[in-house]
Amino acid sequence: METIANDFTINIATANGTGSQSANLILLQSLFEMGVPVSGKNMFPSNISGLPTWYIVRLSDNGYQAPGNRTHIQVLLNPATWDEDLASLEPGSVVIWNENAKMEMNRDDVISYPVPMSALARKINPKIAKLVTNIIYVGVLAELLGIDQEELEAAVAKQFKGKATAVELNITALGLGRDYFKENLSKNDPYIVEKRVIEKPQFFIEGNEAAALGCLFGGVQMLAWYPITPSSSLAEGIINYIPQLRTDDDGNATCAVIQAEDELAAAGMVLGAGWAGGRGMTATSGPGISLMQEFIGLGYFAEIPSVFWDVNRVGPSTGLPTRTQQSDITLLYEGSHGDTQHIVLIPGTVEECFEFGWRAFDYSERYQTPVFGLSDLDLGMNRWACEGFEYPDQAMDRGKVVRERDVFEAFEEFGRYLDVDGDGIPYRTLPGSGMDPILYRGTGHNPKGVYSEKPDDYFELMQRLRRKIDGARDDLPAPILREEDECEVGIIYLGSMENTIQEIDDILEATGIKVSQCRVRALPLHSGVEEFIRRHKTTIVLEINRDGQMYGILRKELPNDLITKIRSVAYSDGVPPRAGIYAKLILETLKEGDN
Amino acid sequence: MSDKPARPARAIKLNVLNEPKESYTGGKSSLCPGCGHDQISNVIISAAWENGIEPHRVAKMSGIGCSSKTPAYYLGQSHGFNTVHGRMPSVTTGAYAINKDLLYIGVSGDGDSASIGIGQLIHAIRRNMDMVYIVENNGVYGLTKGQYSATADIGSKKKKGEPNKTQPIDLCALAINLGCTFVARSFSGSKKQLGSLLKAAMSHKGFALIDVISPCVTFNNNDESMRSYGYVKENEITLHMTDYIPHFNPVEEIEVPEGHFRDIELHDGSTIRLETISAEHDPGNAVAALTALHEAESNQKHVTGLLYFDNTKPSLAEDMGLVDIPLVDIPNEDLRPNRETLDKINAALHG
């Protein structure tokens, strides 16, 4: 039989709360350490324990990180999804299944490896058999695919942080799985794992942890947060690193953390921190952003630096709290009532989660306005390969803050909202300074900050605010372009789609269509996006939602002659983007355009 | 040059910082003439001046409503933030996290504090954040033209409409139950009592709530209202006479009352002296305070004075475990970890 090395997808079906996540991460980590390009997607429920969970491990020498378009190896442990999982497999797939699950193997067109996982686990320790069952399938997979024992053991030690009993127990269980396969089954499938040379050493990290580190290197001074999936690990990442990064020898921190009573309060605290002259932030998800709308408008109108991270999950309403989507784009960009427009930074990699983590504060203080980081569950909560984080290449930008009295006195005229430099960005003084003391307000105000309902004052204020945010366009992270010479079809995409785009590109290229890529990294849109559309005959706007929100923004902002050049491909089912689905939709859309 | 002869110099009274009272005033009020809130603004001005607070070291915080407009009318040298409806506590919390050394004076109303913002008030109390929180409580919504608020007393009738039938929320009882460390009630017409309580609140470490009955002259000052000037004057039960003795004044200079009194030392060394009127009230006894509130409510009276006081609890600044200097004063280089630290993080992640 011809072997297939490093090009297949493993789907592991378990119930949550059974310890399967540890087992899956050990599998993923050991493959990663062997130099195999691998990605893991955790499809977990909004539940503490007992509901179906799938973990998708994709090995791809091409570097594809999206979940594959089909399952090659299915691990079956969960009776609740057993029949459905089994039925969805293509003929010839491999099935490793728990013989003790009291479920039937009713497919004869698959390669079947029955393993008495529960019985083996009970041998080790009947009391914790359920937990141990999971690590047994990792042992079976290791033997089946040829995963290094050394790497497995290292991954176990890493997962359990060297706790001797746990490490020993898990290594024993791995051995039982391996031995069972060796002694009772024989390999009858093509899938194998091959070691690859690691050119640049990498580590695995979740986007939320990367963003947390970025925020700390951005000098965050106050984190106010309310727990919500999938953003909690961003806030907890900051909390976990504060002792190491932002605490003096006496144990006193330079970053305050407040767990707020709700997202409204968290947003209020962020504004309070910005008003007082500090770097305040929160991390939340769509439902939290919905609750924060009123404060977002106040931040825009009263011009208060404030940073909000939105780790997007599936909406509307509570939606699918543990699934991924890019559906908060317009919510952030045009957040709050009245005419508003906000700066949104959209990382597509863990490196950018770190970079935008610190940059968000600089933009927010430079433009004196709310700045959003838009990540998503896929990027935020799954593990991604990273070569390491780069130190900020710019000093902290604290914006136009007048701190000394002689500087203040030198102003011919001072007004909190006076556009002295013509860039729409006024100067501010801080509470406690005694300079230009004004009562900040969400009501209409004149350039001095005094309450005003005068038509001219309101009109001029709104025009200046627009000028200010417009002025940020080309100062924000530029789009990442990968262009073909032909400039036939362009694809504009954003965020975590970065991890699927190359596979989509390759599928399209196989059909003879060469596409250029343009990854938008910020709103308002950089002028490079418009130029990209102008250069290409047709441009697809590709996004993970139903309505084509980025497409809508482009339609609104592009000059008329370019609007007809763009087409929307928007699709979302909660699962991280599978290349096959999007490639097919793009092909269909291009075909429609030809007619 | 004026032709008028120069007037003889008038002696201007200065406070302990050699500041005239004018340093503490604000803009002209746009509230209705006679509004209780304006009296409270005047008491804030006097209290800050008499207490020798540096005017620019105050942060004036408010929500939305008639009461929340008042920060424009006092302490013109202080920065302020007129935030959104009911959310002043959270904005104050964030500002306090960044600059714990300012004196935060929050002004709110009964709509702001007892309805839309009650959650934020509750959690600010829980955190025992250092701030003075004044509720200018008139039982009605003024800016929206006279609807009942959640503090309107049962049976009370505003100028127009039916008597209120809904159970009121007593913010002082709520605060005592939450463990608020300074709880007082006063009346905008009782300038001396309110002044003493306010100065004491400024000297307190922790969250100080002062619920001030402040009649709305336009919508709720009729005879059938239980929050009219006339009704409150007739039905006020004063727990004790209150005097405030600032830490910079030797106690000897203060006239010692003849009857029984109790001195409570405040965080900054100042003292609040409570002189017994009839029955003695112990502000350290939460149950006694709740009983006083309950009895007053049953008899359709308003009880005023320092209801409850506790100086044993840490405030939010201590709980946050921060460096001594306010975070706003930390230089940039101490906020961003250095390059070597990032190298170490990268190395650790590489394992």
Image (cartoon, rainbow, N blue to C red):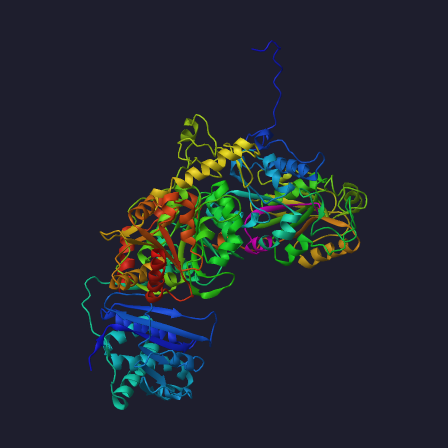
Residue A218 seen by the camera? no
The C terminus of chain A is located in which quarter? bottom left
Residue at the image position 47 percent from the left and 48 percent from the top: A334
The region drawn magenta spans B121-140
Q: Quadrant of residue B242?
A: top right
Residue in front for this viewpoint, B307 or A179: A179
Q: Residue B337 at x, y = what percent?
A: 32, 51
**View extreme (top): residue:** B3
Of A169 and B265, which appears nearest the observer? A169
| B87 drawn magenta | no
Q: Quadrant for residue A19, please give it.
A: bottom left
Question: What residue occupies the far bottom of the structure in this picture?
Answer: A184
User: In the image, residue A385 lies at what x, y percent?
Assistant: 28, 63
In the displayed structure, would residue A581 be above or below residue B132? below
Q: Nearer the viewer, residue A299 or A281?
A: A299
Q: How many marks?
A: 0
**Would residue A90 appear left or right of B239 to someone viewing this image?**
left
> Is residue B129 part of the magenta span, yes or no?
yes
> Quick one: A346 or B299, which is closer to the camera?
A346
Across and down, in percent, residue B260 comes to 73, 48
Q: Is residue B205 above or below residue A315?
A: above
- Vertical side of A456 occupied by A325: above or below: below
Left of A444 or right of it: where is A374?
Answer: left
Q: Is residue A425 visible to the viewer in this orientation of the structure?
A: yes
At which x and y percent is residue A94? 31, 81
Quadrant containing the N terminus of chain A is bottom left
